[in-house]
Every structure is written in structure tokens, then in C-alpha cells.
Image: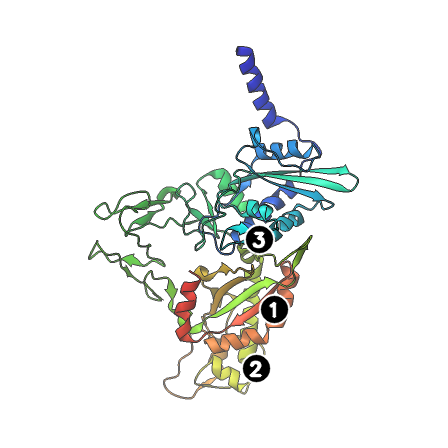
Amino acid sequence: MQFQLFVKLLAAILVQSWPLSEATFSDAEKKKILDTHNQLRQSASPSAAAMNFITWKKKLEHLALKAAEKCKYEHSYGGEYAGLGENIYKGKKTDPELIIFGWFSEKNNYKHDTRTCTAGRMCGHYTAVVFDIVVEVGCAIKKYCTPDYHLVFCEYSHGSGGALYKYGPPCSACPSTRPFCIDGLCANTADPQVKAAVKEFDSTASSTCRLACKNCGKQDTSASQCKCKCDVTVALGPLCESCYEDPACLNNGVEDTSDLSVCKCNCKSGFTGSRCEIPVAVHDNSVKIVLAAANQFKFISNLVFLPVARSLFNLKLWPLLQDEFAAAINAFCRKDATSYAACCPGKTFPSSSLASVSHVTKTDIKFVDSTVANSFDNSLSLLVYSLVSSSDLCKAGTCGSSSCTDPTEVAQTALSSALKSSKEDISKKTKACCGDVILRDIIWYRRFQWYRWFHWYQ
């Protein structure tokens, strides 16, 4: 008996320490595998209410390695593989990013309304990539199983049986075990290893407590935790959910406690809506922009526009767009008397040169975070607007009346015209910068349409 226990213990140690063969991926390739999975998962459309951030699991890597080294294109079932999800690739490609894109391209074969594959088409590789409860992955490659092909195996912590994921606003239903939101992905960043993995994935991402506390419960984020603090006279439970549902106030709005049986929000200046979710600027001076891949990705017979991930937006696209949008606004406002009047109402067009005079800076360019969403075609849309912190351009003009005041925001019509006039040039720069992404659309809505648009994307 003691000998058998010793053998089992030795085997467990060897699994964790056994040197990997040539079938393993490099550290750089492993990072690419993780990044690609998380980017595709955070870009899920329709949006996912509880899509988990995934990390690398060495045990899953060893299982993938074990399967790959057999050089057989067949799934592994039972035993160590019981309950796991698995993706297999057989072909000439070795770049893991392209292989994962190929699996994702089966999205076109998945019917979200019935949660089934299109008859006669394959979609299981896609569902494995975006199954919401998966938290870990491990992959391996066996090159030259024959002179004509390689084999890649990825093992996932959970198999994709049942519903693919819960639909809803990103992070709106993160479980209490993973209550923090990383740009649409649920994670437990109180775990140092997960926190480090998030930093590796997106150094700009902030961890936001997204527990939807019900019935006027308040988030408790002290000591880096994320919990709901309930008013025991109203509700109990992890989410204060034992009474009726009512979401928390946003944007520093506070509950009206005059009647604890009814949840109301008192909004801070600059916000409105039942949850204080709508910036007042959205009503008047924002435009919707749509970022999308310029070309379709082809894998076998599948064609798909790859998603514009929120992490790509954070790290590369938004810093570039801030520069380009500010330049476009300044160029538009300096162009002629009509444009100048749209930017500096009531001011006369200066006779002096305006070539070096600015209306806005890049830090004035803002977006409404709660409107960032991936559409079903995998594009990324959001509302943008521009503040006017201090306009040297308007100061250069002469006020035509005593009531003339410099603006604090760029008017919606001026913003829309400015961005549309520079759209092609901006798209060339985003395409060069950020993997074939273009500024596809700039859409202006009349004021009465804002509320409906905003809530559609909530």
C-alpha cells in the first residue's frame, strides 16, 4: 500500500516537472495564445454577461502535449480529459494566432437564436474558444506528424456543453468568485497570479468591481475586495438579491434613502437616467464611431471579420484616435468662416493666420465607456465627444455680442463634420497601426434618438 502511494506521488510530481518536448510552444507563443483567446472572448457578440478571463494551466498544457505527441487527429475522452473542452488543428500552419482565428471563424456557423450549429456545418471549435465558464487553457503543437501537416491541441478547463454564454451587457453578471471586470472579462484580481496575468494581457486595463448589488445594496471595495454590503432592513444575500431587483447607481450617483422600499438614484451633476448612466454631454455633443476590420479572414471555407478587441482599443487605437481626432477638429475649425462659427459661436473669423492656433488638445477627446460594445459583425462601436478646456482659436476671434461665451464642448455638428472630413486619412493610420482596423462609420443622431440608442447598447 505504501509503495502504491509512493508511485502515485512520484507520478504527480513528474507531471508537474517533466521536461517538455519539441511539441511545446515557446513562451512568446503561449502569450499569443492567451492574448488571442482573451481578445476574442472580450469581443463576444452578442455581448456576454459573464465571460471569464482565462489563464495558462500547465497541467492542461501537459495533457495537450500528451495528445499531440500521438500524431492522431482524434479527440481525447474520459480519464484525465473528462469534463474538459478540446480543440484540434491539423494542417500546415504553425502560427497559433492564425489557428485560433480559424477556430473562431466558425462563428458564422453558430446560430445564437437557437444556440445550435447550422445544419451540416461545424461550429464546435468556435464554441470552445468563447465558452464563458472556461477559466484556463493549455496548448501544444507537434510538428511534422507527416511531411504535410502539424497537429495542435488546446485543452480547456470546461467543455462547451449546454448554453454557450449568458447574453447581456459585458460583466453584468460576473459571479462573486470572479467579481472584477477587465474590459468585458470577469476575473478574480485579488489573486496575485491572475492580477499579474491581467497586467501582461493589457497594461492599461483597470480592475473594476462589477457586482450588480440589488435593492440598494452598495459595493464594498475596501481592502481590494469586491462584495455587496446590504441594508438588512431591505435585502440579504451575496448580491442583496433576496428582495426585488434594482441595479446600483452609476457615476457616483447615490441612493435616495428617504423610502427604503423603493430604490431611486440621485445623480451627480452631468449625469441623468434612472441609474445616472447617461452623461448629459451624450445628449448634445457626441457621435457614434464604428471601428472594424477592413478585410475578412478566410479559413478553409469560412469568412469572418475578426473582432476589434477592447484591449487593442485601449493599448493602441484610442491613443492614436485622440491625436487624430484633435487634429481633425482643429483643422476643421480653422478652415473658413463657416467652420469657425460652428466651433466658436458668436465670434467673428479672425483676419490673422490660424495655422498654429488650436481649439482642442488630445486630452479633450473623450469616449463614453458604457457605450463601448462589439456588434454581431465583430465591429467595435462607441460614443465619442470633445471637451474644450481652453480654446486659443476662439480667443483669437472677436465677440459680436455682449452675451458671447467660449464653448466648453465641441458641438455635435462640428464634431461630426470634422471627423468625416478626415475619415479616410484616419483609417489609413489605424490600419497601419492596428492590424487592418479602419474607422468604418461616423454616425450623427438627432438629440431625441440618444436615449434610445444608449439603452440599446446597455
When asked about the image quadrant of residue 347, the answer is bottom left
Question: Earlier along the polypeptide chain: callout 3 or callout 1?
Answer: 3
Q: Are marks 2 and 3 in contact (CB under 8 Å)?
A: no
Q: Nearer the viewer, residue 20 or 166?
A: 166
Residue placed under numbered mark 1 in the picture = 426
Of discs 3 and 1, which sits in the foreground?
3
Residue 351 in the image, given as x and y percentages of width and height: 54, 87
Q: CA distance from mark 3 to mark 1?
A: 38 Å
Residue 335 - label: 2
Q: Secondary structure at mark 3?
A: loop
Q: Position of residue 229 (x, y in %)?
A: 30, 45
Q: In the image, is 347 to the left or to the right of 97?
A: left
Are there few (<14), some (14-19), or many (20+) residues within 10 Å of tag 1?
many
**Amino acid type of disc 1?**
Ile
Quadrant location, the C terminus: bottom left
Where in the figure is residue 151, as x and y percent of width and height? 70, 39
Q: Nearer the viewer, mark 2 or mark 3?
A: 3
For residue 210, above or below residue 456: above
Residue 26 visible in image: no
Three-letter amino acid code at the position of disc 2: Lys
Specify which label sits upstream in the sequence, 1 or 2: 2
The residue that mark 3 highlights is 118
Q: Residue at x 47, y 64 (%)?
A: 367
Residue type at numbered disc 3: Thr
Q: Secondary structure at mark 2?
A: helix
